[in-house]
Image (tube, helix red, strand yellow):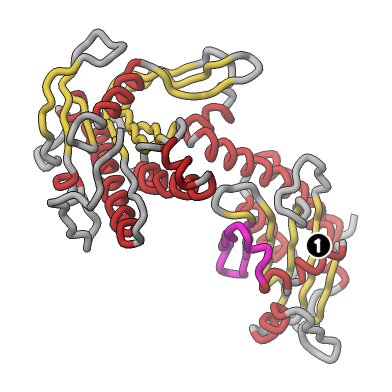
Amino acid sequence: MSDDDTIRRSIADWIMEAALRGVDMQTLVGGTSNRLLGAGVPLARTHVSFPTLHPSFEAVSLVWKRGLGVSAQEFAHGSGDTRSWKQSPFYFMIENGIRLLRRPLVGKSALHDFPILADLAEEGFTDYLSFVVPFDSAEVSIVDKRPDGIATSWVTDRAGGFSDTHLMILQNAVQRLGVACKLAIREEIARNVAEAYLGHSAGTEVLGGHIRLGDYETINAVAWFADLRDSTGRAERLGMERYLALLNGFLECTAGAVQAYNGEILAYPGDAVLAIFRDPDPAMAAETAIAAAAEARRRLFDVNANLVEMGQEILAAGLAVHRGDLAFGNIGTGGRQAFTVIGPAINVVNRLEDMTKSQPFPVIVSDTVVDLLSTDAPTFSPLGSQMIRGSEVPLTAYGAADDVLLPYKAPPGYAETVLEPLPNLLEPA
């Protein structure tokens, strides 16, 4: 066996072992590039780009640079229509079914027919090699008009560019890397989809194999529930497109506040947000849930101030916080299941939120939470002992107004205190 064959085999073996270990894309790209460099391939820059399924972005690019490691860039949905993408070698290759493209960057044979090539030449690089590795999967077209696979480029600053031996080693490595990347990307997509639609904890449990009907875990957590008012009327008045835009704005205020304080969003039941806050210290979970409630009210107030300026109707919502035991697990039938949270605490927090319709407080909190709060917490107004429908155990409820919630744990520079409600801020039932 020649030295070149030994090099190719050692790199291929590492890639396959890494794939079996389930390493992520950054580790694959960085590890492969470093091993190619160590084997004598004069790599200076590696670029691997691939489409994915994620709510916030449609593609990811990983760039390895010699001595600097791997950096990642995410591209928002719609970036596939940008001028920079359509002027790239990757786009040209994908659109024309070209698997391999080489461009000398310096000398008499230099060819800079794509803007990126002129940029690379100015940086001192001498040779550019690109491979497209399609996965040829008929299961899903991840991005319109873009096949499922990876696009890669390999750049050197060696005088004379890549040799024929370097090209053979690179070509051999890229095919193996494509297989490993397919596995890594599929795992990443599975995690993205599970987390986007189930939430982090539920998604992790499901991917971990907890899918049998009846599997559950009992947890103690702070339940957090926010509900948009007058949804049916808004949908009828605004039309579905404008209503959905408004609903997403509401969720950005409420669910966004949960995420800002590391809560776990469990579900969007209709036009509402159901979340939980967990911590080994129950007092910390309670404090965090109240801080998220204050943040949600701040966001809603700011959005409503803008809506008033535009002459549009404002958002009105109720919010409740309660602590108790929850069952976190699988319900449904064998053919269609949901991994969710159930239990008396969910019923209670729903009923408390319903009380905001008849009370002068947009946020109502049970004593199970208030009793855990520190002395610098917002001032809550006692609403007395309440019998919650569906429960035989009374609890004491407290209300919080915006004038005490908005300043609570407000970010630097946010000095606004609401002393009077905005115009037409009456919350319809």
**Residue farthest to the right?**
1
Q: Quadrant of the C terminus?
A: top left
Q: Which residue is mark 1?
A: 94
- Compare residues 150 and 407 and report the one nearer the observer: 407
* Residue 176 image point, x, y percent: 79, 51
Q: Amino acid at mark 1?
A: Ile
| Label 1 neighbour load within 10 Å: few <14, some 14-19, many 20+ | some
Q: Quadrant of the N terminus?
A: bottom right
Helix, strand or loop under label 1: helix
The picture quadrant where one finds residue 384 is top left
Q: Which residues are magenta?
A: 59-82
Which residue is located at x 67 percent, y 73 percent?
A: 84
* Residue 154 image point, x, y percent: 74, 68
Asked whether residue 40 is in view, the answer is: no
Image side of residue 50 versus residue 265, left or right: right
* Residue 197 image point, x, y percent: 54, 36
Secondary structure predominantly adopted by residues drawn in magenta: strand
- Compare residues 393 and 95 and report the one nearer the observer: 393
Asked if 368 appears above or below 257 in the picture, the reply is above
Which residue is located at x 22 percent, y 29 percent?
A: 358
- Compare residues 250 and 206 and report the one nearer the observer: 250
Residue 335 among magenta residues: no
**Residue farthest to the bottom?**
108
* Residue 189 image point, x, y percent: 63, 43
Asked whether residue 39 is in view, the answer is: yes
